[in-house]
Structure formats: structure tokens, C-alpha cells
Image (spheres, helix red, strand yellow):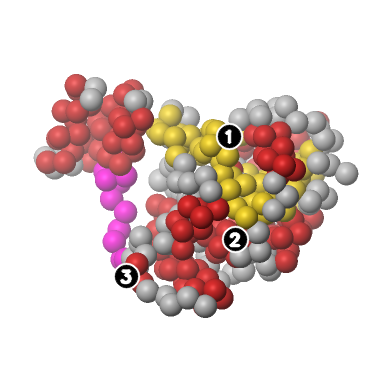
């Protein structure tokens, strides 16, 4: 039996897929399995993972018709042979000690049902944007989730106990694009949740990501997940106390680039900051905030 099962859900992910898989297979932990769940991809993803399955006995391919991320993750976790299951996305990169550190933490903290980690946000080219950690303790993480804010535990950085995951009902289809917030809220009701304050994952940001492509649906689902948690916990739901609001705002590409630039500047990644300051400015050269950003980029501070 493997010590850890890694579940990697895949849908048309050929661009970064090999890099993601290699980062798992290069772990310093021995004795894990990698479940590669193809969710009806129409690109070359299935061929890539079939090749890995032939070359490495730790890899196991699961396939089926397209049912979305919730369905493919539920399938992968249900088929995992280990009690401890690490989640992974097709465009992210694990640090070599990720599984060993999380396994050690879970073995040392039997009350913990899920542990994530600090992550490094990277851009589509793999350039660093900024580190991110919204809380280490159960209380801080649960409070952030109850505010509706995502990322308190970064889903592909998480390792969870399969028995707890099954006990709370797996991922339901009620909170599309915010299923991670719902899951972590329910897991926090049956055990402790935590983050390791070390960077164990490079978390890729790109405009095709859920938070940019499906922002409106994600925000609505997050609010609904918090409301459901309040009902379970016997709390009064107050939408005005949330960190998010339901909105019909359209994602502005220039504003996304500007956000990445400010994050990179705060983190000391001047090269990345200049890259996205310039891209933001190109989208609207006369916008005051972008001109200010460009001046900061030229100064480097």
C-alpha cells in the first residue's frame, strides 16, 4: 500500500502537464502512487499520461467522459489506495519535499484532516509573482473560509485524510468553482485544518484560470458555501460580513496585470513587476493608475 496517493485531475492540460507530473515523480518521498485522472480531454493530454503510465509503475491512469473538476477529483480520491491523499493541478509544480513534509505533519498531528502549505504564485512562464499564505492555524484558516475568501488553503497544495473526505460527503456539485471552500469548511467541522509555512508548491496564475474565467460564478458559489456552513453550525448568515460580494463585473485584463505587478513589487520580484506593469500599460496607455505603475517599474520601487 502506498503511503500517499496523489490525485492529479486533467482536462486539456498538455501545455504544462509534463512539468506537473515530473515534479510529483521527483519527490524525495518513496512509496506513493500518482493517479492521473483524464476528464475527457480533447488535446494530447491522454497520450502524455499513458506514456507516463508505461514508464513508471507509480502512475495509474483513470479516464472517463468529461464531467468537470468536481467529478474528476471525486473519482480520483475515491480510487486512491492510501488514506492520505495529496491534490495536484495540471499546471502547478510541487517542490521535491512536498509530500514528505506533509506526510510527516499529518502523522504528527492525527487530529488534522487537511494540511496545505505556503505557495509561490508564478506567472504563465514560471516567473515568480509573490509568496502567499493566508493563515497557518485552524482558527485563521476557518475564519478566512467563513469570510468567503478563497485561498486560505490552496487546493492543489493540500493533503487530506480520505476517510474524513468521504465522511463529509466528498465534493458536492452545489458550489461549482468554490468547491474547495465548501470542502475545507466541512472538514473543519470534523477535525483540524492547517497550513505548513514553507513553500511546497508553485501555484500558476494565468488568465484562463478559474478565478478569472469564472469569477462571477465562483463568488456566488463561495457565498452559498458560507451560507450553508452557517446553517450547519447554527450561525446567523450575514452577507455584509463577507470579504466578497456577488458581482457582474467583467475581468479587465489590464487590471489583472497591474495586480500581478504590484504583488511582484511588494515581494521584491522587480523583473516580474516590470513585465506586467508594461503589459498593463499597453492595454490602456493613458490610464492614470497604469502610468503610475510604469513609473514605479522604471524606478524599481
Q: Earlier in the sequence, mark 3 or mark 1?
A: 1
Residue 272 as seen in the image, left or right of residue 230: left
Q: Is residue 33 magenta?
A: no
Whole-angstrom CA distance, mark 2 to mark 3, is: 23 Å
Identity of the residue drawn at 28% across and 27% down: 274
**Mark sitting earlier along the chain (2/3):** 2
Badge 3, how many Cα within 10 Å: few under 14, some, many 20+? few
Looking at the picture, does residue 45 appear above or below residue 249? above
The image's mark for residue 188 is: 2
For the residues labelled 1 and 2, say whether their Cβ atoms are less than 8 Å apart: no
Q: Which residues are magenta?
A: 247-257
Residue at the image position 54 percent from the left and 33 percent from the top: 199
Marks 3 and 1, how far apart at CA:
34 Å
Q: Earlier in the sequence, mark 1 or mark 2?
A: 2
Label 1 secondary element: strand
| Label 1: how many Cα within 10 Å (few below 14, some 14–19, many 20+) | many
On the image, the x and y values in percent for residue 262 come to: 29, 36
Rendered residue at 72%/37% (across/down): 104
- Name the foreground residue: 107 vs 209: 107
Residue position for label 3? 240
> Can you tell which quarter of the image residue 217 is in?
bottom left
Q: Where in the figure is residue 234, as x and y percent of width and height?
A: 52, 78
Q: Position of residue 273 (x, y in %)?
A: 31, 29
- Toward which corner of the image does residue 255 lie, by quadrant? top left
Helix, strand or loop for disc 2: loop
Q: Which residue is mark 1?
A: 200
Residue at the image point whose x is 61% and y is 65% from the top? 189
Q: Is residue 179 something one can see in this rendering?
A: no
Amino acid at each position: 500500500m502506498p503511503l500517499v496517493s496523489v490525485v492529479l485531475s486533467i482536462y486539456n492540460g498538455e501545455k504544462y502537464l509534463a512539468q506537473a507530473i515530473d515534479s510529483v515523480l521527483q519527490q524525495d518521498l518513496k512509496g506513493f502512487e500518482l493517479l492521473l485522472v483524464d476528464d475527457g480531454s480533447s488535446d494530447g493530454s491522454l497520450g502524455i499520461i499513458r506514456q507516463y503510465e508505461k514508464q513508471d509503475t507509480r502512475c495509474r491512469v483513470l479516464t472517463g467522459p468529461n464531467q468537470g473538476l468536481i467529478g474528476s477529483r471525486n473519482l480520483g480520491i475515491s480510487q486512491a489506495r492510501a488514506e492520505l491523499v495529496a491534490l495536484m493541478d495540471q499546471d502547478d509544480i510541487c517542490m521535491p519535499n512536498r509530500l514528505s513534509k506533509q506526510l510527516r505533519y499529518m502523522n504528527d498531528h492525527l487530529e488534522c484532516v487537511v494540511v496545505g502549505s505556503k505557495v509561490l504564485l508564478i506567472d504563465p512562464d514560471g516567473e515568480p509573482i509573490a509568496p502567499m499564505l493566508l493563515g497557518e492555524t485552524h482558527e485563521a484558516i476557518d475564519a478566512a473560509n467563513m469570510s468567503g475568501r478563497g485561498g486560505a488553503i490552496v487546493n492543489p497544495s493540500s493533503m487530506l485524510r480520505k476517510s474524513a473526505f468521504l465522511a463529509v460527503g466528498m465534493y458536492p456539485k452545489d458550489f461549482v468553482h468554490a468547491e474547495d471552500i465548501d470542502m475545507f469548511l466541512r472538514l473543519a467541522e470534523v477535525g483540524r485544518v492547517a497550513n505548513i509555512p514553507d513553500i511546497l508548491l508553485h501555484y500558476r496564475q494565468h488568465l484562463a484560470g478559474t478565478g478569472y474565467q469564472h469569477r462571477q460564478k465562483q463568488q456566488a458559489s463561495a457565498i452559498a458555501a458560507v451560507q450553508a456552513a452557517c446553517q450547519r453550525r447554527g450561525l446567523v448568515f450575514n452577507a455584509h460580513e463577507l470579504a466578497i460580494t456577488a458581482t457582474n463585473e467583467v475581468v479587465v485584463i489590464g487590471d489583472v496585470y497591474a495586480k500581478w505587478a504590484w504583488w511582484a513589487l511588494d515581494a521584491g520580484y522587480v523583473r516580474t513587476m516590470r513585465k506586467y506593469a508594461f503589459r498593463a500599460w499597453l492595454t490602456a496607455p493613458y490610464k492614470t493608475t497604469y502610468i503610475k505603475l510604469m513609473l514605479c517599474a522604471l524606478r524599481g520601487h
